[in-house]
Image (cartoon, rainbow, N blue to C red):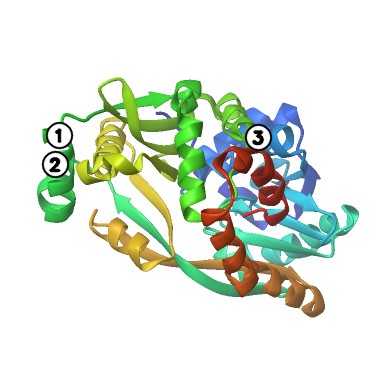
Amino acid sequence: MSLPDLKPQMETCGAPIVVEPAGPEDAPLWDNFVESHPEGRYCHLWGYRRTLEEAYGYHCVYLKFLGSGQLVGVFPSIQVRRRRWLISQPFNEYGGPLTLSLSCEQYGQLTRLLLREAQREGCESIEIRGGIGCEAAGRAASWKFQPLHSYALLRLGDPEHLWKKVVSYEARKGVNKARKAGLVAEVRRGARAVEQPFYHLYLMSMKRLGVPPHPWRFFLELAAGIGDRLVASWVMEGKQPVAILLGATSGRRVHIFVIASEPRAWPMRPSDLAHWELIEWACRQHLEVFDFGSARYSGQIQFKKKWGIEFHDYGYYLLGSAESTGKLKSGTVRTSSKSMAAMATLWKWVMPLALTRRIGPPIRKYLTK
């Protein structure tokens, strides 16, 4: 994949910053910028906007940053009017502005301009999830950082080296067990990555986790919006999928965000095979980073650790007045509250599977998680 070089634009780093709404005509340049940025994820891409608008009806606020008339940054977000927030980005541990290396003065300008745009949208503050790559901006006034969890990365390279020297014995044992059981993995892209019975497996997995699911349309619109960047590892037992690992590429990174599996197949270790198949595929595509996403719970951390990953801390950036960011802080931890834990338990053990696809999406839209 040939990516545009950001270096020729570095002369703009002393120019005043201008913030403007981005429109459909900006989509190609926007995506080129995201693909070129080392911290660009699929949720920064223009096609994710389509997903949020069509699947959930969100009002999206996508802003471009200009210096000397050249693109020096992008900022995707949604408006949550009931809370008077801009959120970047919903349903992700990542979000926030992606910028070139700007000066301290320019980051200060950017802070004021972002708050001005939020006010124009009827919002008094901004919640930036992850904010990986905007740490320099986060040192400006009015920004507050709330630590949360870690995210996990595997540096890619030669797959044989990864298999022998990086991946743990436990992971290799799981992959070999799956293969000996006759399971076969294949990588699918675009709409094929999320065709049925993906959604049925996904619904079952979300119910086990006690998490309200996305509507199927979310995944269909994601495939339509980002195309072959959507990628999945399907593990088959004969003609029946027993595990599907879903992710998306951006630049030289693949980021996984859904694992759906059939419980009866767990003794055969299909999830291990799904991960290794996608890791091998990413190496063959000359990608450089396999992004496992957040690592929050002990079991999740142990599973990811066996692949030889490195952990990095992340949190939320809260941008606004002291009063408004205080409100935001309570919002960021809401999903860990006792009431949310009780809701998750009810969802897991009481909610019929047939109702989860009808009731879950409206709850998910409200939570933005």
Q: Within the image, what quadrant is residue 205 found in?
A: top left
Residue 214: in sight, yes or no? no
Q: Residue at x 64, y 51 (%)?
A: 89
In what quadrant of the picture does the C terminus appear? bottom right
Circle 1/circle 3 CB separation < 8 Å: no
The tag on residue 51 is 3
Q: Nearer the viewer, residue 364 or 233?
A: 364
Expressed as whole percent of the image width and height from the top left, the position of residue 275 reads 29, 42
Q: Which of marks 2 and 3 is in front?
A: 2
- Please give the count of numbered marks on the rendered protein: 3
N-terminal of the pair, mark 1 or mark 3, is 3
Mark drawn on residue 78: none
Q: Which amino acid, by three-letter code, is at mark 1?
A: Ala
What secondary structure is found at the residue carrying circle 2?
Answer: helix
Give how far apart the Cα atoms at labels 1 and 3 are: 37 Å
- Residue corresponding to mark 2: 177
Residue drawn at point x = 30 percent, y = 20 percent: 239
Q: Residues within 10 Å of mark 3 (few under 14, many from 20)?
A: many
Which mark is nearer the camera, 1 or 3?
Answer: 1
- Residue 136 vs 263, above or below: the answer is below
Q: Which residue is drawn at 18% across and 50% down?
A: 171
Which amino acid does the dot numbered 3 rest on? Thr
SS assignment at label 3: helix
Q: How far apart are marks 2 and 3 (CA)?
A: 37 Å
Instruction: Identify the secondary structure beneath mark 1.
Output: loop
Closest to the observer: 277 or 37?
277
CB contact under 8 Å: marks 1 and 2: yes
Give the CA distance from mark 1 to mark 2. Answer: 6 Å
> Which residue is under mark 1?
181
